[in-house]
Image (tube, coloured by chain):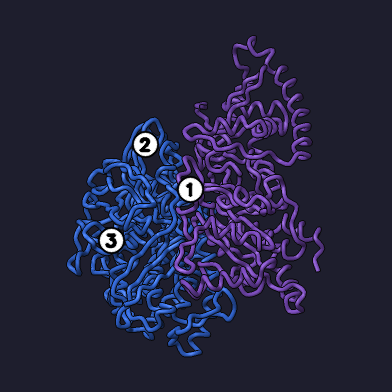
Amino acid sequence: MLTRREFLTLCLTATAATGLAGILTPFLRQAGAEGILPRPPVIWLELGSCTGESISLDNSRNPSLYQLLTEFFDLRYHWLYNTVQGDAAVRVLLDTVAHEAGKFWLIVEGAVMTAANGRFNHVFVRNGEMVTGLAALTEFAPQARYIIAVGDCAAFGGPAAAHPNPGGGKGVWDVITDRVIVNIPGCPSHPDWMTGTFSHLLLYGLPDLDAYNRPKMFFGHTIHDKCQRRQQFEDGIFAAFPGGDGCLYKVGCKGPVTHADCPLRQWNNYVNWPVKAGAPCIGCASPHFPDGTMPFYSHLPGIKTRSVRVSVAKIGAAAAALGIGAVATHLAAGVFARRIHKQYLDGTKPGDPTPPENLAQVKQELDDLIRRQNALLSEARKIEAPAPRRRRRSLLKRLINFWRTEDKTGKDE
Amino acid sequence: MARKILFPVTRIHEPMRVDVEIEGGRVTDAWVGSHLFRGWEQMLVGRDIRDAALFAQRICGICSSAHAVAEALALQQATGLAPTANGQHLTNLILAADTIQNHLRHFYLLTMPDYAAMPDTPPWTPHPAKHDLRLPPQATAALQDHLSAAINVSALAHELMAMFGAKAPHQQTILVTGVTRQIDADTVKAATALLREIRYFVEGAHLPDAQLLAAHYPDYRAIGKSGGNFMSYGMFPAPVTGQRAFKAGVVTGGGPVEPLDASLISEDVRYSWYRDASGGPPGAADTVPDRDKPDAYSWTKAPRYKGLAFESGPLARGILNGEYRQGTGAIDRLVARAQEALKICRLAESWLAQLVPGQPTVRPYELPPIGEGAGLTDVMRGALGHWLKFADGKILHHQIVTPTTWKFSPRDARGQRGPIEQALVGTPVADPGSLVEVGRVIRSFDPCFTCAVHVINAPNAKPLII
């Protein structure tokens, strides 16, 4: 059997070359045959969703959906796949809840629609009575072994709960408060994030979760940390329009404030991901998505501290001058202070602020941030002081600027 | 007379309830209801116009790229911007890959269990009591083999989409003037190989399998006819000329193909859970949800063209383009869909061949602060329209009429049934307990209620003739 450490390493590094399925499937198949690991009964409950998570899971290559259905899961109820319909399907659902209480996994896709006491979303009919998604969830959740919210909507409300949220969309954990909900966000969730988490649950139980209940093995780093265009950010080479070469920070990339492993993992059999395709990250795995990360094509705010003001136009120079990571540090600090979040709600109204990361983590990261921001401030003062005296740009400076600015006409924002 | 409720109708997308009245072994009347309200148009108002495509695309995760394509068309009309040649081909390729994916999944995962025995494990077990399976064992075994292959090939189709669209579902690269993905010869080569693999499957399995079902279920050529009205907005515009590979048009009551005039589209809310003041052409008053409205039974509005209900989708496109003449029943929808998947594979190959590596895929632009436009295009399931109006770079009005709204509309004020309600009337019922035949007719339309958004705020849409 794989040790847990080996498994985590796999999850962190899994790509087409070293896929999870190739290594996991034989284990699971053998364990299943020996009766060590029975396929868990699963109920997939779809609420206020776009079915995107189911479709994303269909795209899974690692293992494939077919393997998942025939070897990993005992998927008793998912209205997208059940052969029976109507009353017979409802019977399957209710029988599973009754006979597998304490054993079945409840996977929820889509936000819980709570407006009008849930009547904006009905999911089945029982004895002639329409049952709302809200009622079904609150009825089944206490019986479930694990409750897993897949996609940003189920985890945090997501697009289905965007302002003004007429349907009253909420994340599962806002409704079921007395159970641990494993949140696998993303719009949609990467199939590996889902199958990896399912496999961990199957083999070792609950994975390590961060304060947003996201498995740390997939959501432990920011996009910015692992981005292939990170070096261009450091060098101050920025794209002036989506699709251009260079870092996409100025055209709205939310990579610095979004936790997910897209740059390493990539999407759809690991062929591509937004920044590689020239599109800025829109922060779809973030708890603030979409209201908190809109407008998608507007850049994160410039650096403003008491003594220094660096506009976006100069952020490349600042990054080069202030040292690696200083600017990203500042952005992260902005998120902690919810400054960025606030600025991003222009045109939309904020919901309740999302809860902070877990306390120990917040403390450690804040200490770190304060230390680094102090360094940033002192560096900033150094740059700031001689600035007014310099009237003409030296040839060297012009040369440097020429190479740093992507737009050679010098037309910056 | 017995009234039966079918809820949930499984193997479609999202909550759908169907009530049927059965007399003498036949359906005599039907009501189709959608049971999810999220309020997308209300959410769109006030947002940055540049975000509309990526946000609206979250309406539906099955045909996500469709909304981005329609949004780009609407903004092209509003601003006069045009996509680059590469950009238009890539946009078409993204939508084509998404469409093939949808058609394959619809056939093998959603429809096939109605006609053939599936692997003996949940979610495919249990079966309905009287299943009426007619295929010989050998054919069933072949179909089951194709099932696991189809799951992988549909994932390949999404891989192709992701090559140009960054990821699937919910691509991220389509803009008004093209696609942000730059093109090199390497990518074109890889995509061509991938597409060929997909085409082999569609050619060698999907289409023959659909024809096999048609051969064993010939009675379904007569069952499930929607009333003879078909429409299409056209699909896949060419660069520069804008000429669409699938033509736009309407057929009324089996008559000749006529041009489509978008100003004749109107909507009705008599049986929808909205306050009444919102009938008439798209562009009328605000619509307010009213879940307690008497007699209403759906969150879907009832769109009508010239006051009539219209079917759109692969069958309608096949008829309007003169490529499908076998019939208009439930099984014809499956065959027309498979035939279309093959045609789209071939079209996509030609677009790949026309890509010029190194040429721009997108042209930088700035949107004017004010604008108004309509983007009408056919997508995988039928006719999709986005109407929008913006000022100060923010959305003032946004309206979306999706394929599902057309096909699964409830009755209108004149009591006229929606296309699927009409198609269900006359369907034979062997076992009122399992209603297998009713399920077959419904699924042949490829329903998707995630898409069944409805109109909240409508601009004064300009008459638009495609």
**Residue B431 picture location, percent across and down:** 40, 82
Q: Nearer the viewer, residue A49 or A85?
A: A85
Residue placed at 81% from the left, 58% from the top?
A: A5
Q: Colour of chain A?
A: purple
Image disc number at residue B460: none
Label 2–label 1 contact, CB within 8 A: no
Q: Which chain does the residue under circle 1 lie in?
A: A
The N terminus of chain A: image quadrant: bottom right
Q: Is residue A365 above or below residue B425?
A: above
Q: Marks 1 and 3, Cα distance to the nearest angstrom? A: 26 Å
Q: Secondary structure at mark 3?
A: loop
Q: Which chain does the residue under circle 3 lie in?
A: B
Other-residue count near label 2 (Cα within 10 Å), few / some / many at <14 / 14–19 / ≥20 = many
Residue A325 picture quarter? top right
Residue A78 picture quarter? bottom right
Marks 2 & 3 on one chain: yes
Residue placed at 73% from the left, 61% from the top?
A: A200
Q: Identify the residue position indicated by label 1 in the image.
A: A115
Q: Amino acid at mark 3?
A: Arg
Marks 1 & 3 on one chain: no
Question: In the image, which is nearer the foreground, mark 2 or mark 3?
Answer: 3
Label 1–label 3 contact, CB within 8 A: no
Q: Identify the residue position indicated by label 2 in the image.
A: B396
Q: Nearer the viewer, residue B100 or A72?
A: A72
Image disc number at residue B411: 3
Q: Amino acid at mark 2?
A: Leu
Q: Secondary structure at mark 2?
A: strand
Q: Colour of chain B?
A: blue
Other-residue count near label 3 (Cα within 10 Å), few / some / many at <14 / 14–19 / ≥20 = many
Q: Amino acid at mark 1?
A: Ala
Question: In the image, which is nearer the foreground, mark 2 or mark 1?
Answer: 1
